[in-house]
């Protein structure tokens, strides 16, 4: 879809803090993060809704892998996975690290966006990517 912001990220027309990529999916830091380490995981093919993606099982397995890596990278106590699909009409799973007193009471508050400097975003992305690579090398060695 030519006007889709996420499709433009997939094609490299818009830069991103990429943390994951395979043939089917791409994960990158949200530029309006709800917490440090907030990753958006999208299918590289344009689908409006998460449930439209034909390989939904793999989609959530990748989200789990990224969530564990993000949790470790930012020292979160847990991870929330959120799928709404109204903000950007391209399927995406929000992977949101959670912290004590993070401003999200009774779930996730979409208005509780955090300001994170670009250099810090880059560091977070690098840590998540490193943790994903570490997970993958452990799986290969077993």
Image: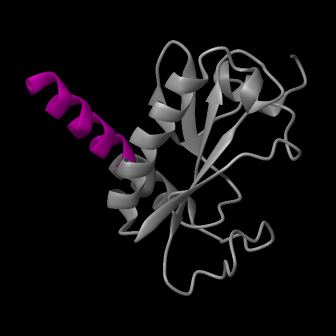
Is 134 situated left or right of 19 in this image?
A: left
x then y, percent, for residue 89: 87, 33
Answer with the quarter of the image where residue 96 lies.
Answer: bottom right
Answer with the quarter of the image where residue 102 lies.
Answer: bottom right
Q: Is residue 84 above or below residue 42?
A: below
Of the 4 image quadrants, the one containing the C terminus is top left
Answer with the quarter of the image where residue 46 lies.
Answer: top right
Of the 4 image quadrants, the one containing the N terminus is top right
x then y, percent, for residue 11: 67, 18
Q: Is residue 73 above or below residue 51?
A: below
Is 18 situated left or right of 136 in this image?
A: right
Of all residues shown, which one is farthest toward the bottom?
A: 101
**In-front residue for pair 17/104:** 104
x then y, percent, for residue 80: 56, 59
Measuring 50% from the left and 58% from the top, which residue is drawn there? 37
Q: What secondary structure predominates along the stretch shown in magenta?
A: helix
Please give the count of numbered marks on the rendered protein.
0
Is 87 situated left or right of 129 in this image?
A: right
Measuring 80% from the left and 30% from the top, which residue is drawn there? 49
Q: Is residue 47 magenta?
A: no
Magenta region, residue range: 128-142
x then y, percent, for residue 76: 41, 69
Measuring 46% from the left and 32% from the top, which residue is drawn there? 61
Q: Is residue 139 magenta?
A: yes
């Amino acid at each position: 879809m030519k006007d889709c912001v996420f499709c433009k990220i997939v094609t490299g027309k818009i830069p991103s803090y990429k943390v994951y990529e395979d043939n089917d999916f791409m994960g990158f830091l949200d530029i309006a993060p709800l917490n440090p380490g907030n990753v958006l995981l999208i299918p590289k093919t344009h689908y409006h809704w998460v449930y439209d993606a034909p390989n939904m099982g793999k989609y959530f397995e990748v989200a789990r892998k990224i969530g564990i890596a993000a949790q470790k990278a930012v020292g979160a106590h847990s991870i929330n996975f959120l799928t709404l699909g109204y903000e950007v009409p391209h399927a995406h799973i929000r992977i949101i690290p959670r912290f004590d007193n993070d401003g999200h009471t009774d779930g996730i508050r979409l208005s509780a966006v955090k300001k994170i400097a670009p250099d810090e975003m880059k560091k977070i992305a690098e840590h998540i990517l490193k943790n994903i690579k570490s997970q993958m090398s452990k799986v290969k060695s077993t």
